[in-house]
Amino acid sequence: MFNSLQKEINQFIDRGLDRSLRIAVTGLSRSGKTAFITSLINQLLHIDRAENTHLPLFDAARNQRILGVKRIAQRNLSIPRFEYERNLAELSQNPPHFPQSTRGVSETRLAIRYQRQNGLMSYLKETGTLYLDIFDYPGEWLLDLPLLDLNFQQWSQELSQSFQGIRVELAQEWQQKVKALDLTAVANEDVLADIAQSYTDYLNACKAQGLHFIQPGRFVLPAELAGAPALQFFPLLNLTEEQWKQLKNNANSNSYFAILQKRYDYYRHKIVKNFYEDYFAHFDRQVILADCLTPLNHSRQAFEDMQEGLGQLFKNFHYGKRNLLHRLFAPRIDKLMFIASKADHITTDQLPNLISLMRQLVQDGGRHVEFEGIETEYSAIAAIRATTQVNVTQNGQQFKAIQGVRSSDLQKVTVFPGSVPSKLPQAEFWQQRQFDFDQFEPQPLEQGENIPHLRMDAVLQFLLGDKLA
Ligand SMILES: Nc1nc2c(ncn2[C@@H]2O[C@H](COP(=O)(O)OP(=O)(O)OP(=O)(O)O)[C@@H](O)[C@H]2O)c(=O)[nH]1
Ligand SMILES: [Mg+2]
């Protein structure tokens, strides 16, 4: 009798303690999203109550309160599965490889069984399960948010303003085709598809030049929409008000002009809006990754372009109540984490500078940015640590340096990568070129060992700590 009562109470409490958490991970192309999620899953799966040395900053693991972690079937069957096994297989090869580049959104689900910290009724040995859903989605998709507020004409006019310099050069083929088109004529699908392809080629060329203002974002990362008519339209640049008026008066519903407008509206109402509604509005916590080091290594132009792209992306998270995202979708994000990725390229004494640089990027050079009601954290990590840190002595002086297998020649090298600026770099920085680093290959993964990392435990503590208390 008592036993069954106790069992019932336990079950009741268990149910009460089951929680779910949806974490979204985003960032521009190559910022390290796939590496991050692969490592996060891997670190969790390697939590072992007896032997827990790989996550010292993650309280629940250090206190041995995590009883077990399992990958389980995801809930939404129409989203591609995050390819954890494949990524791990790549890292387990000899020699190991970084996971492949990905396109579009993916999802994965973990169940974490844990013991409560100091429940009032801790004698009941309360345990709970945290169901963790993790989403990987391209930051480029976030750049489409402004379209929701613009009709076809407004959008075209906005793009006309930034249509200058190198853009005009790259757009030649597309613009020639548009000029030859009678917009009031009856639309031919093949012609539309062809011109839209030229527009897409133009956007890809912009991207290859390091330009980040790319709309619609899906044109360069179409995922499952590749080839769909929903992506076969383009803006009409540099038309006068009078020309817009003429077109609206003279174009029939089956004309090129009318079809372009319809497709644009379909794109923003179905594709952009659905993305925000289906995913965004339901995320609990958001991680934004940024690779600040590669552009720093590259050139001033590359760095400033990244700054601009990130600026566009961050706009979504400036949660003033008047913000478009807030008005339309009322997202419920309560924690936001900005992470500078690939921090194994620098020595640990440079981490504070990297974090400070990231903070400056987010805050647009110091202007205060409000993320209303959201707990915000800045961090620097290596999801898949490719280097180790060593001390070297030169001319009687000790330096920290990093050691790893350099990608360019597969040689094991020891290098001093230099100092990271703690503020947005000024002209002198680019003249002096104080910073120089190589790309490294991942370290071999020992059988049964977790992926080597840097500060993933701090990330887990921020993202999950309160849910496992
Ligand atoms: N050294 C080091 N390199 C990393 C790390 N994470 C990512 N990289 C490098 O950055 C590249 C891109 O990482 P991904 O995780 O594929 O980035 P992504 O954001 O998923 O990229 P896309 O899917 O192409 O948008 C990798 O192939 C590695 O070369 C890290 O922790 N350390
Ligand atoms: Mg990826």
Image (cartoon, grey):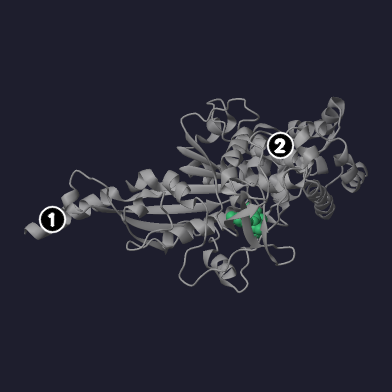
Q: Nearer the viewer, residue 11 or 388?
A: 388
Q: In percent of the image, x 86 and y 35: which residue is there?
A: 164
Q: Quadrant of ligand 1?
A: bottom right
Where does the image place residue 359, in percent across and percent down from the top left?
59, 35
Callout 2: helix, strand or loop?
helix
Q: Residue at x 81, y 30 (%)?
A: 161
Which quarter of the image is occupied by the N terminus? Answer: bottom left
| Whole-percent x, y for residue 211 in the image | 77, 42
Residue at the spot of label 2: 308
Bin the neighbour count of mark 1 within 10 Å (Cα to Cα): few under 14, some 14-19, many 20 and up.
Answer: few
Residue type, numbered disc 1: Gln
State how many labels appear.
2
Q: Nearer the viewer, residue 301 or 312?
A: 301
Q: Residue 167: x, y in percent?
A: 85, 41
For the residues carrying marks 1 and 2, which lies nearer the camera in this image?
2
- Residue at 91%, 45% (x, y): give it: 172
Q: Would residue 400 be visible to someone looking at this image?
A: yes
On the image, numbered disc 1 is attached to which residue?
6
